[in-house]
Amino acid sequence: MKTILLALALGGTLAAHAQRVIPLYPGQAPGSESWNWSEKEGTQRGTHYVYNVTSPTLTAYLPAPGTATGTAVVVCPGGGFHLLDIDNEGTNVAKWLQARGIAAFVLKYRLVHITGTDPGQQMIPLLKDWNQFKAVVTPVVALDIADGKQAIEYVRTHAQELGVQPARVGIMGFSAGGTVADGVGYGYSAASRPAFIASQYAYLAALPPQPVPADAPPLFVAAASDDELGLTAQSVQLYSAWQAAGKPAELHIYAKGGHGFGTKTQHLPVDSWLDRFGAWLAQQGFPIAAAPKP
């Protein structure tokens, strides 16, 4: 009997810690109904990635009830719209937020169709010609921004069951995921307005020129001067646009860190950018719990 009870208790504990995967749309995602390929994943040079996403999802990382602050973040990993750097810019970030009482939702948004088994092989040649890259990714960018808006709307609509406050749901994005987050920040509706935006080394050339919204949310920006893709100036321009519009914004440009620093440990000042983000959140009035003790 004791063995059975122990098994049930362990099963309940494991179930409580299992991550909930939430389909973003009730049926096929609007605009890609004809996509019939399957989502895949792989690992290369220590990087775990996902590609060929056709059915967008949110993976929920909910904090323990005793530590939950009511703040929530939709996390958009990057990967050049060809893949998602799912750990470095997704689950690792989500777990950092979760440990500090913030509900995190990792967004798998729709991606360019990869015809082989190596998304990098298909993407990297495009990075030598930004015009060619933009032409290839533009068809999915609008779909991805729609996924970002839908993600915020979903979390806000289901705030009570998810243990968050509807007015405290923000969005964060890295590289191509930054395009998604910033695209949402420029074009939200009342239902999909993020409470705040965090943009890390974003690719913004895919977004059309547009004014900062009159009720734009606070903005946090982080990038590195030695970004191999040369995107640092775009982060500065984003910050400058918010500042010129008189909206709250904070900018961190690190001397070193490269493109895609995410949650990597490089033994550089850039390693602490998440701490800066947490302090900024608290300053903006979004509660965050103390970091867990080692």
Image (tube, rainbow, N blue to C red):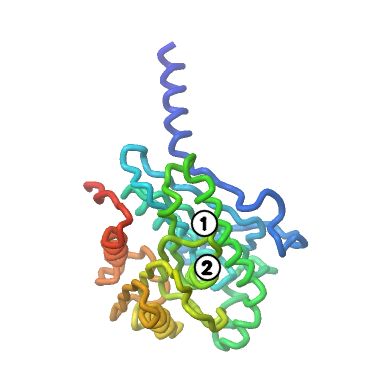
Q: Residue at x 57, y 81 (%)?
A: 208
The amino acid on which the numbered mark 2 sits, given as a three-letter code, is Val
- Which residue, given by chain and number where applicable, does mark 2 sit on? 184
Q: Residue at x 59, y 61 (%)?
A: 147
Residue 138 at x, y = what percent? Answer: 63, 77
Q: Residue at x 39, y 77 (%)?
A: 242
- Element on which disc 2 rests: helix
Q: Toward which corner of the image does residue 145 lie, by quadrant?
A: bottom right
- Element on which disc 1 rests: helix
Q: Residue at x 47, y 63 (%)?
A: 47
- Which residue, given by chain and number where applicable, does mark 1 sit on? 152
The amino acid on which the numbered mark 1 sits, given as a three-letter code, is Ile
Q: Toward which corner of the image does residue 216 lie, by quadrant?
A: bottom left
Near mark 1 (Cα within 10 A), the count class, few <14, some 14-19 or many ≥20, is many
Q: Residue furthest right?
A: 34
Residue 205 at x, y = what percent? Answer: 53, 83
Position above or below: 225 against 53? below
Could one spot residue 134 in this view of the protein? Answer: yes
Q: Work out whether mark 2 precedes mark 1 in sequence or the reverse, and give the earlier one.
A: 1
**Front residue (pair 42, 94):** 94
Number of residue marks: 2
Q: Residue furthest left?
A: 293
**Front residue (pair 154, 85):** 154
Residue 241 at x, y = what percent? Answer: 41, 81
Are the residues flagged by discs 2 and 1 in contact, CB closer than 8 Å?
Answer: yes
